[in-house]
Amino acid sequence: MTNEQWQLLTQIVRGETPQKPVTGFIIDSPWLPGWAGVSTLQYYSSEQTWFDTNKKAIETFPDILFLPGFWSEFGMCTEPSAFGAKTVWNAYSLPHANRVLSDISQAAKLKVPHPKTDGLLPFVIQRLLNYHTPIRHMGHEIKFAIARGPLNIASFLMGTTELMMAFMMDPENSHKLLETITRFTIDWVQYQKEMFPSIEGILLLDDIVGFIGEEECKTFAIPYIKRIYQAFDSEINFFHNDAQGLVSTPFLREMGVNFYNFSFEHSMNEIRELAGPEVTLIGNLPPRDVLAAGTPEQVRTETRKMVEDFGDAQRVIWSCGGGMPQDVTTENIRAFKETIDKFVPQMLSKKNQ
C-alpha cells in the first residue's frame, strides 16, 4: 500500500468523503495464485513468485486499493503452526492445519508460542524482510499487522464444533484457551510492528465470531479482540467476519473496530444501522455467485443495484462481501470498478438535488 493510499484510507475512516469513489478488495492466496496462473504451492514456496504475483495485481489494477497489501501468509495455517499444528499442503488448494487439542481440558497445558521462532511465523517475517526493498521501490509500505482472530485460531486448534460445545460446557477452560491465544496474538502483532515501524493498522480475521450467540460474543469474543486491538496505537482497526454478522456488529466499536468487512448476506444498510455511523464499511457484492461466477454484465447490474440500495458514500469502500474468492477474472474486476466510478457520482448527484 502506498502512503497516498494509506492517507486516503485514513481520511475515509475519519469520515471524509473522497472526491472519487474508492474500490478495494482483500486479496490473498485463495485468489492470487489462480488469477496469476501459478499453483497455490508455488505461491507459498517461492518468495519471488509471491512478490511477482502481488506486483502483477497492483500494476494491473493501479486504481484499486488492495488490502492489506503484500500479505505474507500461509492460508489459515500461519498462526496454528506456531502452536505445533501439522500443516497439510496441496498444490492447488489452501493448506489445512491439523488439530492440537483433543479436549478443552487440555487448554491449560497449551504454552504461549514465540513469534520470533515458532511455526511459520519467522518465514512470514523473513519473506517481507527479503522483499522489503523491492516493495518500497514500488512506492509501497507494510501498513498492517495481520493475524487470525482468537476464536478463529482456537477453532483450528480443537475444531469448530468442539469449541462451540466448550463454550457451553466448560467456560473456565475456554477462557484459559482464549487467554493463551490472545497473549500470543498480541505478541505477534507487536512483533510485526517492531520489525516494520511503517505499520499503523491491525487486521484481524475471525469468522467464528459469526457462529456464536450474543452472550457468547460478550463473554468469549469482545474482551479478547478488544485487547488485541490495543496492542499498539493503531490508526485503523480492520475486522473481517464474512460469516453471520448481525450478533457481533453492534459491538464493533466496543471491540475497537473502525473498519469492517462483512458477509454479502447482510445489506449495507443493515450493517450500517447496527454498526453505527462511525464504522467504515467495505463491501458488499456477493463474492462467489456474482463477482466470480457472473458475467461482466451481471457484475455491472448487481453492482449498480448495490450502490442504489445503499445510497450513501460516507465511510464506505466498495468491494465484495468477504475476501476476493477464487476464479474472479480481470474482466469482472474491471466491470465492478467501472460501474462504481460511474454510478456512485450519479447516486450522490441525485441525493443532493
Image (cartoon, rainbow, N blue to C red):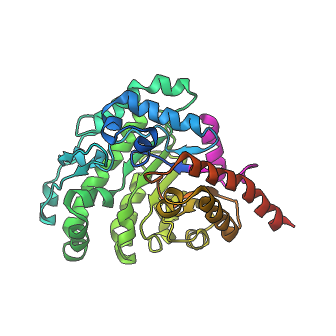
Instruction: Place residue 122 in its image quadrant.
Output: top left
Q: Is residue 162 visible?
A: yes
Please say whether residue 1 is visible from this viewpoint.
no
Q: Closest to the observer: 31 or 111?
A: 31
Q: Position of residue 351 (x, y in %)?
A: 80, 67
Magenta segment boundaries in residue numbering:
2-24
Q: Is residue 300 magenta?
A: no
The residue lying at 35 percent from left, 65 percent from top is 208
Q: Quadrant of the N terminus?
A: top right
Find residue 309 and report its horizontal and vertical position in percent: 67, 71
Q: Quadrant of residue 162?
A: bottom left
Residue 127 in the image, given as x and y percentages of width and height? 36, 30
What residue is rendered at 31% in x and 49% in y?
A: 94
Which residue is at a point 45% across and 57% down the rendered structure image? 240
Residue occupying the point 19% across, 66% down:
173
Question: Where the C terminus falls, by quadrant?
Answer: bottom right
Seen as rendered, the residue at the extreme right is 353
- Residue 243 vertical placement versus 42 (above, below): below
How many numbered discs sit on the rendered protein? 0
Would you place residue 88 above or below residue 218 in this image? above
Up the image or down, 29 lies above or below 166; here it is above
Along the line of sight, the residue nearer the viewer: 308 or 134: 308
In the foreground, 17 or 258? 17
